[in-house]
Amino acid sequence: MQTKYVRYLICPDCRAGDLEIRCETGDADNVEEGALVCGCGASFRISEGILDLTPSGLSADGGFEAQRQQREHFDWYADNEIQSYLEYQQMPFWRAFDDKTLSDWDRRIPKGGVVLDLACGDGRCAGPLADGRTVLACDISRKQIVNASRRWAGRDCFFFVGDAQNPPIAPGTIDAITLYGALHHIPDPEAGFHNGMALLKPGGVLLAAEPNLTVFRPLFDFLMRVLPIWHEEANDDPLISRQMVRSWAAGAEVDVETSVFIPPHVCNWLGTAAGRAMFRATEALGKALPLVRNQGGIILIAAQRA
């Protein structure tokens, strides 16, 4: 763990920043084994260079059952014989969507700033956005964080284990927050949205991509029952609507649009090149049609703090 990032962190238990590093192996700049200790008495382990900054109750019966379920699911998804998280990302549909969305977000986020990527997985979003920026990135799954640290070694990224619903980050220190398919995995998406906004500097932006509450959703659900192409473990109410976002964003400037007007199954069947071309064509067509433009499968959110 690189100690230069500690200035952004707070204790997830008492929500204060009275933190001290205790190094067992490593050096003052990069701790391999040790702990991050808070003045409240809480201690958070650093093992093999990875900081676990999750609330103390997450390791016991402390009311974090939903987070523990997500940890179990994404630990499994980090590496298994059925479909790893990296294999999931590499299917033609997600490659097309990632190319478009991450390019759009890269243009929105100024160079030189600090980005917080919540529920980062293996760095799918964090790694590309680290070009010219400092990226802090947390996930509830240690195995995903280990994979992210290896995948993006050499980038200005700080990957640590943390709860995306209540990020252990000092308020007002972040220029941009990204939630790439994250809100529908945390127990309370509205709380996650508000807690994220509180971390932004004035003028900072929160960017999110989530499943849309669309009239076409039953078709997608039917296709996933007949031919599942990935393995989901979402919260109890995973679909997010424009109305929900606008109610959450009271006091903030928010833009909402939708994306994905082609079933992912079709995109995958076409293959990488043809699937990307079809994705782009249906994006242009879907957004040009008044009755369809708000019915894309994924809702894209951009909320700016006043």
Image: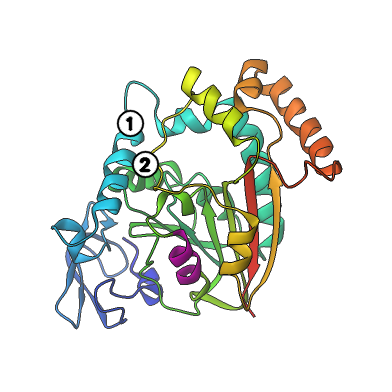
Looking at the rendering, the stretch of residues picked out in magenta corresponds to: 189-196
Q: Which residue position is annotated with label 1?
A: 79
Which badge, 1 or 2, is on the more N-terminal residue? 1
The answer to whether residue 190 is left or right of residue 82 is: right
Residue depicted at x 60% and y 22%? 265
Graded by Cα atoms within 10 Å as few (under 14), some (14 to 19) or many (20 or more), the crowding at tag 1 reads some
The answer to whether residue 249 is left or right of residue 10 is: right
Graded by Cα atoms within 10 Å as few (under 14), some (14 to 19) or many (20 or more), the crowding at tag 2 reads some
Q: Nearer the viewer, mark 1 or mark 2?
A: 1
The answer to whether residue 47 is left or right of residue 290 is: left
Give above or below for 298 relative to 137.
above
Q: Secondary structure at mark 1?
A: loop
Name the foreground residue: 104 vs 207.
Answer: 207
Residue depicted at x 32% and y 21%? 81
User: Count the marks: how many?
Assistant: 2
Q: Quadrant of residue 162?
A: bottom left
Q: Quadrant of residue 296?
A: top right
Q: Secondary structure at mark 2?
A: helix
- Indicate the amino acid at tag 1: Asp
Q: Which residue position is annotated with label 2?
A: 147
Query: Residue 145 location, x and y as percent?
Result: 35, 48
The residues tagged by marks 1 and 2 sit, at their Cα atoms, a distance apart of: 9 Å
**Badges 1 and 2: C-beta atoms under 8 Å apart?**
yes
